[in-house]
Amino acid sequence: MEILQFKRPEPLPNVDSDLLAFDLEMANSFRSELPVICMIGTESYDPRQQCALVTLATITKRHQEFELIGWFLDHLSTFHQRHPNPKLVTFSGSDNDIPWINERIERFGFEPERVSSFRRFEHLDLRVKFHQRTQNNQISLKKMEALFGIVRDSTLSSRKVSYILTGVVGGNSRGDGIPEKIYDYLQEDVHHLLVILDRWDAQSVETHHFTELEYLERCLSLLRQCRRPGERIPPRVSPAQLEAIERFADALETNIDRAIVAGGFQDFQLQPLPELNLRFSEVERIAKKFHQLSGIELWEPETRTFRLKPLLNRPKGALAVVRRSGKVLMIRRAEHLERAPGYWGLPGGVLEKGENPRAGAVRELKEELNLDGRAVRLMGTSPSMTKEFELFWVEVEVEVEDTTPLEPQAEEVAEARWVTPESFHQLSPLIPGAEDGFRRFLGSAWGPRGKR
């Protein structure tokens, strides 16, 4: 095992001496074997000297992992002796680093006395802290660094680091030991945790607040998961469980429609999840998505202020996604229309007052192509070409073959046709943003040709 220590002179006026930043790097993360912790980095700050002390401990052999974890526990014990109430600072450590350390402690059978200091550390997870402040947990360390004005020298990614370390531990890498650039990467990781904390209170993150549209996407993800078990024949769960899940999904869909029509989630109610048998993975995923959604607080308890960034109060439209035999029904808008004249897109239009997107998509399909349809599901949202409207993509089922002659209504539609992914890319002019939307909702074959 190799241990390196060095100092970083840099003023961090808002960082206390009882904070210890911590990060680890893994090898064999992409293999079936148990991953190996082969690098641990820590950094603490001394306000009197305005200097940070960095410590990097590394191993290059699988059998040295016991020694590395033992060193880490002793390292924390020494820090604890100097600071009665120490705090361990991580990024996403609650989901990754801490569980990995705990697994090794249990597997290697470290005595409780040696582990006691580690247990006394208060854990400060910056990803969790960011989520608590903004309701948004879609944040990476790289994005957080950019948000707090931190420039990273290293161009490596976490995946690349793990790949390199896998080669080192497996003896397949060229050169001797761990490359110097990996040390630099880990050093930046732990140092930037303290820099972020130093700038935390002064940095505005209003633009990163969890939005109503992001919350809607979580609701739709849960709804899609609820609809899946009943689609399997024979069902993997009991009829009673399927019925309970369907009732929950129906209520959730109704509440989503009400929120969209109302223009916000201020009055949204997430009904309790029924008691489920978690033996089956499909049902377990429903419970997981529900708990993630229920953990998002719509209201600030003390001030009773709405916590989501409003976005559903903008004008809304619905698009009908009709699929048949690998094709999608497209229309070319009439030349005399005010919006997007002559452009190819999906059937659709502006929602009427009090109308939900599913009903709107069915109505627009009837008005534009004289087709009777049944709304299957709400797929998601995208902004309109002018960014004025929020468009709701709705999958609609029709009782018609793709060879049946279509009846476009001339006052709104110039022509209509069924298109494959290949012919879709040949449509011109195509409404801007259509390719990105098709890729997102229908798959990569429909996306921009340069990104496939």
Image: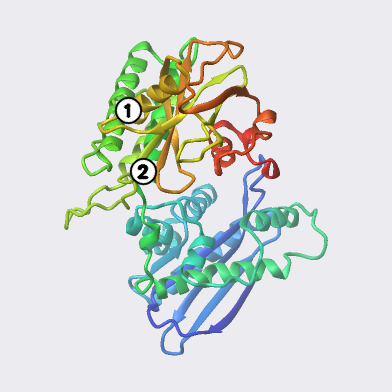
Q: Is residue 279 visible?
A: no
Residue 433: x and y, percent?
Answer: 55, 43
In the rendered view, does 341 fall on the left or right side of 298? right
- In this figure, which residue is indicated by the disc labeled 2? 215
Q: Residue at x 40, y 64 (%)?
A: 117
Q: Is residue 246 visible?
A: yes
Residue sitting at x 46%, y 28%: 412
Label 2: which secondary element:
helix
- Residue 225 rendering spot, x and y as whole percentages: 43, 28
Q: In the rendered structure, which amino acid carries the disc numbered 1?
A: Glu
- Asked which quadrant contains residue 378, the reply is top left
Q: Quadrant of the N terminus?
A: bottom right
Pointer 1: residues within 10 angstroms few (<14), some, or many (20+)? Answer: some
Q: Which residue is mark 1?
A: 253
Tell me if label 1 and label 2 are in contact, CB under 8 Å.
no
Residue 296 lies, with reference to residue 373, above or below; the image says below
The residue tagged with tag 1: helix, strand or loop?
Answer: helix
Tell me which corner region of the image, top left, top right, bottom left or bottom right, holds residue 228: top left
Which is nearer the eye, 205 or 162? 205
Q: How far, Cα to Cα, is label 1 from label 2?
A: 14 Å
Tell me the quadrant of the picture where the C terminus can be found.
Answer: top right
